[in-house]
Structures are given as C-alpha cells and as structure tokens.
Amino acid sequence: MPLEPLTAISAVDGRYRSIGAELTEHFSEFGLIRARLLVETEYLIALSEAGVMRVLSNEEKAILQQLPHISTEEAQIVKKIEKEGYEGIPATNHDVKAIEYFIKKKLADTSLADISEWTHFALTSEDVNSIAYAVGLRGALQSVILPALEEIQKSILFPANMHAATPMLARTHGQPATPTTFGKEMKVFESRLARQMQQLQERSILVKFAGATGNFNAHVVALPDIDWQSFAKKFVARFNTGYKITLELNEVTTQIEPRDTYAELFDNMRRINTILIDFSQDIWRYISDGWLIQKVKEGEVGSSAMPHKVNPIDFENAEGNFGVANALFEHFSRKLPISRLQRDLSDSTVLRAFGTAFGHSLVGYRSLLRGAGKITLNETAVRAALDAHPEVIAEAIQTVLRKEGVEVPYEKLKELTRGQEISLEDFATFIDGLSVSDEVKTRLKALRPENYIGLAEKIALG
C-alpha cells in the first residue's frame, strides 16, 4: 500500500498533512540527513580555515557547501548505505556513519578526494547529531512556530483593543462576579502569550562538539597544538548567522549534551500550548453562552443529525491537538536530560518524535486562527447578561461604605443580596436608608454594572 495521507498512521502525516508539511524541512528524516551533512561539510571547511588540514580553494568550499542540498533520491542513497549497502559500501547499520561514507563517495571524483579521510575527523555521532537536531529545532521555531504564534497574538490583540471598553459580566467559580470588559479578558491571554513567546525567542540551545566522551581525547592525541575548545566554540558560532535563537557550545558534557536547554524549550512550548488551551476553553464557553457568534460556512455540516448546529470545532480541535503535543513535550523534558552514565541509546527514538509534537502544536495554532476568524462579539447578549445581574455592584457599595465608616457594611450587603434576586431599585431603597451624606448616596445610586469596570479599559489597551 503506498504511503499517502489516507494510509499514514500519524494524523500529522495523514489528515493534517497539508499543515504538517511546513515542518518537513526541519524534522523529517530527509531534513535530519541534510542537517547532518551541513555539520560535516562545515566541519571540513572549518578544519581548513583553522590550518588543521590543507587550504581549500573557494571552488572547493562551494562544492562542500552545496553538498547538503541533496534531493530525496540522494537521501535514499544514504539510507541504502545504512540499511543494505550501496555500490561497494557495506551496510553500516549506523545512520551517522552512513553520512560519512556518503560524503566520501561524493568527494571521490572531485579535487577534494585527498581530504576524504578528514570527514568526521575525531568526532562521535553525537557531535554531529547535537548540532543537527538543534539546527532543526531552531529552524522550526523561527520559520514556522513563532510566525504562527505571532498571528495568534495579533488575532487576540485585535478584540482586546476593539472591545477594551465593552462591559461584560465576569464569572468566578462560574458565578456572576464583578464586571470586566471583553477586551480586558482577551488582553489577559495576549499578555500571557507574549511573555512566553519572548522567552522562546531569546533562548539559546546548548550543543556538544567534543569527541567520544566530551574530552577532545582523539583531537588532542592527533593534533596536540590546536586549541580545540576555542575551535569548537568558533565552529558552533558558524551556525548562528541570521538567527535570533542561538546555538552555544556546552563545554562540559559526557558523550552527549545533557539537553537541559531542550527541556527548558519544551517546557516553554508546553506553557504556550497550555495558555492556548485555556483560551480555547474560554472562547468555547462564550460561544456556548451566545456571547460570541460564529460565522456560518456555506455547505458545512455541524451535526449529522441536528441541522441547526454550528459547532465550535476549531477551538475543540485546537484543544485536542495541544493536549497531544503537551504530552509529548512533557515526556521530552523528563526523558532527554537523563542518560545512563556517559550515554545510552534510549534517546534516539525520542529525538525523532520532535516533529510529531511540533506538528500537533502547529495544527492547533492553525485551528485556533481559523476559529478566531469566524467569531464576532454579540454585544446585545453580553449586555443582557450583565443587566440580568445587578447584584454585582454589591462589592462596590460595601467598599465605599467601609471607607465612610459604616458599621459591618459587608454583612449588610450580604443579607441584602446573597441568594436573592435584586434590582437596582432595591439597591436605591437600601442606599436611601444609609447614614451617609447625600453626595455619597448620589454616587452610589449612579453605579450600574456597565459602568463598574474599574481600570479594565486601560488594562486592555496597555
């Protein structure tokens, strides 16, 4: 059976293939092969520039720099070298060694044939993988994930500004509470998201490039006069040109980089997705209450049995995908910083699952954006819900009475309002019986749920 969206096991590669394809360059096996080739070929150039091996001409450097830009057909050759052997090269059963042999084969018929054995010089697989996976992560974040999050941020900021002063009933514990504005409630999510996005944009990813167990053993025995630590720092810095998220050398490692910065990054992603789950659930509730109206899409079916329904499917889809992604991110954060002694291989398959977590995240972001584009605020319904609960100004009245020195004002308002249906007229009668000045009575009678919003508008626009 041919592999296509209908036959894929993973939803990211199947149902959501058109979305997940945006991450192919960064997380697919093809993308990983290209990233590994990039590390190995840049290493050859760096060795030359450091005087470790012979000087390369500009044309030879161009050959090496072009090598990572392989086709899928050429990537298949790498896989054949790994799995079954290819044109005299025996099967390696080792993915990074297959990369080394592939490079040597490509150099054999060029002027670079004499430097062939410098390929992978003194390195272990993790030196290549550490940078390659970091390049993939960084690339996905900067070219796909952060732009998607910026779109979401804008989609939340728009109603925050538009409805900064639109009064709305708040609910705490699901019960009517002190009024707010719709814009301010949107601003809460935008502000939370912005903080996490800033952390994501400003972080660095530590990588390792120090040989078999992190000590430059082979490097030093072969070329003891080279400052290999300085070389490694400069080499890693080669990969930072044009990027805000940087790669940095971890100078103290075992065979593998401990990946604490991976855990920090994945926890950051998990917090972002958790904020957007919270947002999705609140929007779902506002739609359920009729406070938000969804646009009807021509031809779309909301229910196979109930023709009237317009379901909030985009927000439900987002919530579900964020949950799957977060389960994986949480596992990555727990698993990857732990290794038996200097190295074990239990991390290998986990590293290859990065694309699945980011894929489900991206599907969630696209769903959220699609849903946000369909909703408008039903100001009539929002105002009706607010007007139906005049009791929410009880807080304001009892607070003013505290300031005026009235005895036990909270208890008086509790007796008047708790569990009772009460009107503004009832409040007026209560106020008339208070021992306070006429100016205070006038001010209290002017209170309405719609004007009791505090600094909500200012906060929303802040």
Image (spheres, rainbow, N blue to C red):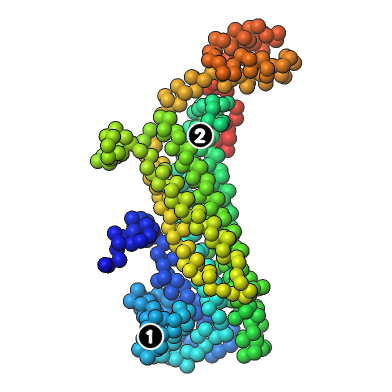
| Mark 2 Cα-neighbour bin, 10 Å: few <14, some 14–19, many ≥20 | many
Between marks 1 and 2 in the image, the one whose residue lies nearer the viewer: 1
- Report if residue 259 is visible in the image: yes
**401 sits to left or right of 372:** right
Q: CA distance from mark 1 to mark 2?
A: 62 Å
Disc 1 secondary structure class: loop
What mark, if any, has residue 406 been given in the picture? none
Instruction: Give percent across and percent down for residue 433.
Output: 65, 6
Disc 2 secondary structure class: helix
Q: Quadrant of residue 403?
A: top right
In the displayed orientation, state which residue is furthest to the bottom: 114
**Of the pair 288 and 420, the residue shown nearer to us:** 420
**Of the pair 440 and 266, the residue shown nearer to us:** 266
Is tag 1's residue or tag 2's residue first in the polypeptide sequence? 1
Report which residue position mark 1 lands on.
85
| Mark 1 Cα-neighbour bin, 10 Å: few <14, some 14–19, many ≥20 | some
Q: Amino acid at mark 1?
A: Gly
Q: Residue at x 36, y 86 (%)?
A: 86
In which quadrant of the rendered image does the N terminus lie? Answer: bottom left
Instruction: Give percent across and percent down for residue 421.
Output: 53, 15
Report which residue position mark 2 lands on.
183
**Of the pair 441 and 263, the residue shown nearer to us:** 263
In the displayed orientation, state which residue is furthest to the left: 299
- Report if residue 204 is visible in the image: no
